Each structure stands twice: as structure tokens, then as C-alpha cells.
């Protein structure tokens, strides 16, 4: 008999942990090679983990809901093969650079900047927590460097899962403490120990300190109400949206475009396009193409903010919001078209169709939703005219495209007279970070985008 380790796989360069959502097998169950044995969640992506060998489950080392570092052994399978000197534990994914973590140990080594352990446990960095509240190694390391006492840590209001103090929470607290601003605190009651959580490096964006107020209690008639527990994706969406509003100074500007030429183009060429390229021709590739051309003219919109520095990206990766489930009830995810500035309309159409299909079938990998530099959300698919979308951090702008609607508009005729004509019109709304993008820049960006969209017609080469 041989024992095979199943480890938490590394599915993205910046992802250092995963949450166990559900075990599909229990101890004693037989499994086939490549059979899925559990579901895990990373940042917005739920995925399945298969076993690398056939055999019998003999150990499940973490409970459902546990946050597990990449590389940690999460289960063991006993196979019928004899153990040889050359045998080595294998996992469900390629070997990770992250060190394996013994789940039974309550403390984790704190990693330094090159990933090596510094030899101190998280609770040894500062005095031990008296409440049982868990603090990640990175949080503890920052606390040690900035001389934040355990008493102060215990008082910080956490915005992470189960009220944990995140790196952003601690950095905002330190910033507020240095500036003398009011700091949001909370009282932490003793809690049970939870599985260790490894956090990546400190975030690129440090939001300005703000005072957080506790939400008022919700009063409702229990006999005529249904209580629905948020799933993992909805919790993450809620956290990301609130964090974005706290980080960026949101402003939204709206323009309209006459896309009659684009509508005629799609109607005229969609059949031949699908027959030739094997993908459907929709409006989205044209929206992305127009955004790419406009971002090249206005690179400040393709940027991020890092403290008092502006990071202007010389590459363009476009995130495309995809609604999941019937009528969007399954949440929202934003897969990224990488290298959008290097693709033509055919390449963009293929990328969009592939990402959307894998998003709806829950086949996206974590790398598919990382690295975006600008985001597009098309609420026009639901018939909405325009909205004010929330910026997808750490980007500085997001474009919303509304429904294309035929309506009467006034146009000047060649002889100088005015006439009312029926045209296909749409609204474009740009939400942007007013810390670095002013209204004039946003306005010129939108007008350039409008001109590009209005330039497409049935003679445009595909």
C-alpha cells in the first residue's frame, strides 16, 4: 500500500490560499484517478480538486470552511500500489513554491519578502491574542514593524471574513494613527481558533483612513420574510464593492453614441462571421476594440494608484463583467481578456466567448480573473439604459454600456436643414477615480470613445 498526499493547489501567481467549500468524499470512500473529491474557493472562483491516484480516502485534514494555504496537505489517499524508494507524495496540481503547512499546528511561520521563513510564529511576533482572534502572519509582521500592540490589534474593526483584521485594515489604522485622525475600533469577544490563513504581500493601494459606523439592526417581520445566507461569491462581491467605494473617489460621466452603423454591420455580417470563424459576432468585441483604441490615446485611464504614485500600464487587459445564473441570480464575475491591445476583432470575439462560457460553467481559473487594467460592464443586455458602475480595484475606471435603442433624434442634413430621423442610440457611462482623473479628462475620453464607436459601419473589415 502507498499513501498519496492531496495538497491545496496553486492556481494563480498571487493566490496563496483557498477555502474548502465542500468535501465530496468522506474517509473510507473509494475514488478513481482524477475524480473530484472537494470544492474550493479562491478570490471569486470556485473550482474542484481531483485526486491524482485511485484508491481509498484515509484522511481528511481540514473541515469545510477552513482557509488553507497553498501547498498544505488537505487529504490522503491509500493506493493499492506498493511503496518504493522513489515514491514521493503527489498532489492535485503542480508542486507549489509555498511551503507545506501542518494543519495541526496553531502557529505559522512568518514569510519574509523572498518567501523564506523567519523562524517566528505568528503569535510570537507580538504578545499573544487574549481573545482567540486570528491574525495572519503578514498582519502580525506589519504590527511588529510599526509597533502596534496586541491591545491595539484587538481594538481594530476587521473587514475580512468573520471580522478578521486584513492588511488594509491595519495599514489604514496605522495611517490614521500617524495623522491623528479618528480610528474605528471594536471590541473582540473570545472565539474559537480557526485554521491558519496565509496572506500575500501588502496591497498596492492604501485607502485613506475613514470612520466606519456599525450598520443599524435590521427590523423585519419574521413571519413574512425569508432569510437567505450569502454564499461565498456574494460575500466576496459585497466586500469588494464596499472596499472600492472606501478606496476611490467615485464620479460618473455619461455620453451617448449613435451606433446605427455598428448595428447594421453586425446584422449584415454575423452569419458569415460565425461560419468563417466559429464564434458568434456580438457587440462586445467592438466595445472592447473601441475601449482599447481610446485607452491608447488616454493612458491615464489605464492606471492604478499606489499611495502617492500613479502606475500607468503600458499593456491593456480588459475585464468583462459576466452575470451568472438565471437573470443574474448567480452573482457576477469579471474574467479578463489578456493582451486586448494585441488582438483584432476576431481574436476579441473568440476570447469573450471562451471566457463567458467558462465563467457560466464554473471552469474559470484564478488567473482568468486577475491582471485587468480596465473593466467593461454591459448592463444593456438586461435592457437598462445607463448606470453608475463601481470601479474594479485596483483600476481607476470602469465603462458601462447601456441598451441599444431606436429613437428619434435631430440630424443636420447636407443642405443645412434639420430633420428628425430614427437612429440606434446607446448611453455610455464612465465611473472614474477622481483622485487622478478629472472631469475634463473623463469627458474627452468618452467623446473619443463615442467617435470610435460611431465609426464602425458595414464596410468595416473583420
Image (cartoon, grey):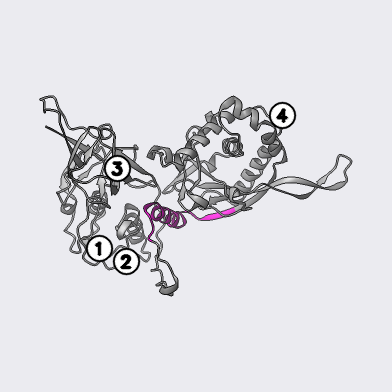
The magenta stretch is 229-252
- How far apart marks 1 and 2 lie (CA) works out to 8 Å
Mark 2 or mark 3: which comes first in sequence? 3
- Asked if the residues shown at circle 2 and circle 3 are in contact, with their CB atoms under 8 angstroms apart, the answer is no
Work out whether residue 456 or residue 187 is closer to the camera in this orientation and state it. Answer: 456
- How far apart marks 3 and 1 lie (CA) works out to 25 Å
Q: Which residue is mark 1?
A: 154
Q: Nearer the viewer, mark 4 or mark 1?
A: 4
Mark 4 or mark 1: which comes first in sequence? 1
Mark 4 or mark 3: which comes first in sequence? 3
- How far apart marks 2 and 3 lie (CA) works out to 28 Å
- How far apart marks 2 and 4 lie (CA) works out to 62 Å
Q: Which residue is mark 2?
A: 185
Where disc 2 sits, the SS reads loop
- Asked if the residues shown at circle 1 and circle 2 are in contact, with their CB atoms under 8 angstroms apart, the answer is no
Q: Which mark is residue 308?
A: none
Work out whether residue 241 or residue 201 is closer to the camera in this orientation and state it. Answer: 241
Task: Please name the residue shown 52% across and 36% down the image.
Answer: 353
Where disc 3 sits, the SS reads loop
How many numbered marks are there? 4
Residue 83 falls inside the magenta stretch = no
Crowdedness of circle 2 by 10 Å Cα count: few (<14), some, many (20+)? some
Task: Please name the residue shown 33% across and 61% down the image.
Answer: 177
Work out whether residue 112 or residue 45 is closer to the camera in this orientation and state it. Answer: 45
Q: Which residue is mark 4?
A: 459
Q: Which residue is mark 3?
A: 16
Q: Is the magenta region chiefly helix, strand or loop? A: helix
Q: Nearer the viewer, mark 2 or mark 3?
A: 3
Amino acid at each position: 500500500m502507498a499513501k498519496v498526499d492531496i495538497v491545496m493547489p496553486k492556481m494563480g501567481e498571487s493566490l496563496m490560499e483557498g477555502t474548502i467549500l465542500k468535501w465530496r468524499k468522506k474517509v473510507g470512500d473509494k475514488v478513481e484517478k482524477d475524480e473530484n473529491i472537494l470544492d474550493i474557493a479562491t478570490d471569486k472562483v470556485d473550482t474542484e480538486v481531483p485526486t491524482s491516484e485511485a484508491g481509498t480516502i484515509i484522511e481528511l485534514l481540514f473541515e469545510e470552511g477552513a482557509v488553507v494555504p497553498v501547498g498544505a496537505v488537505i487529504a490522503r489517499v491509500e493506493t493499492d500500489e506498493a511503496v518504493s524508494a522513489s515514491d514521493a507524495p503527489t498532489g492535485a496540481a503542480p508542486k507549489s513554491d509555498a511551503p507545506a503547512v501542518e494543519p495541526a499546528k496553531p502557529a505559522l511561520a512568518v514569510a519574509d519578502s523572498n518567501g523564506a521563513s523567519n523562524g517566528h510564529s505568528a503569535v510570537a511576533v507580538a504578545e499573544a491574542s487574549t481573545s482567540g482572534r486570528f491574525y495572519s502572519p503578514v498582519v502580525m509582521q506589519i504590527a511588529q514593524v510599526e509597533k502596534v500592540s496586541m491591545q491595539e490589534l484587538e481594538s481594530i474593526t476587521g473587514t475580512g471574513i468573520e471580522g478578521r483584521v486584513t492588511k488594509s485594515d491595519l495599514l489604514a489604522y496605522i495611517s490614521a494613527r500617524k495623522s491623528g485622525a479618528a480610528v474605528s475600533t471594536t471590541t473582540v469577544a473570545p472565539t474559537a481558533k480557526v485554521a491558519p490563513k496565509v496572506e500575500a504581500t501588502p496591497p498596492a493601494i492604501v485607502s485613506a483612513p475613514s470612520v466606519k459606523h456599525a450598520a443599524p439592526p435590521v427590523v423585519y417581520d419574521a413571519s413574512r420574510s425569508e432569510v437567505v445566507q450569502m454564499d461565498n461569491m456574494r460575500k466576496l462581491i459585497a466586500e469588494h464593492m464596499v472596499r472600492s467605494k472606501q478606496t476611490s473617489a467615485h464620479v460618473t460621466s455619461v455620453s451617448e453614441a449613435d451606433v446605427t452603423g455598428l448595428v447594421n454591420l453586425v446584422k449584415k455580417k454575423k452569419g458569415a462571421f460565425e461560419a468563417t470563424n466559429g464564434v458568434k459576432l456580438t457587440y462586445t468585441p467592438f466595445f472592447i476594440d473601441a475601449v482599447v483604441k481610446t485607452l491608447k490615446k488616454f493612458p491615464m485611464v489605464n492606471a492604478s494608484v499606489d499611495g502617492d504614485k500613479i502606475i500607468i500600464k503600458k499593456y491593456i487587459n480588459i475585464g468583462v463583467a459576466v452575470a451568472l445564473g438565471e437573470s443574474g441570480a448567480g452573482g457576477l464575475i469579471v474574467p479578463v481578456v489578456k493582451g486586448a491591445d494585441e488582438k483584432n476583432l476576431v481574436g476579441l470575439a473568440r476570447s469573450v466567448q471562451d471566457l463567458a462560457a467558462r465563467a457560466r460553467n464554473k471552469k474559470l481559473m484564478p488567473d482568468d480573473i486577475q491582471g485587468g487594467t480596465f473593466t467593461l460592464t454591459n448592463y444593456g443586455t438586461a435592457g437598462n439604459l445607463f448606470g453608475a458602475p463601481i470601479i474594479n480595484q485596483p483600476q481607476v475606471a470602469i465603462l458601462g454600456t447601456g441598451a441599444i435603442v431606436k429613437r428619434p433624434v435631430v440630424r443636420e442634413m447636407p443642405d443645412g436643414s434639420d430633420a428628425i430621423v430614427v437612429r440606434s442610440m446607446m448611453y455610455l457611462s464612465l465611473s472614474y477615480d477622481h483622485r487622478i482623473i478629472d472631469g475634463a479628462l473623463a469627458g474627452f475620453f468618452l467623446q473619443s470613445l463615442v467617435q470610435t464607436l460611431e465609426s464602425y459601419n458595414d464596410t468595416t473589415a473583420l
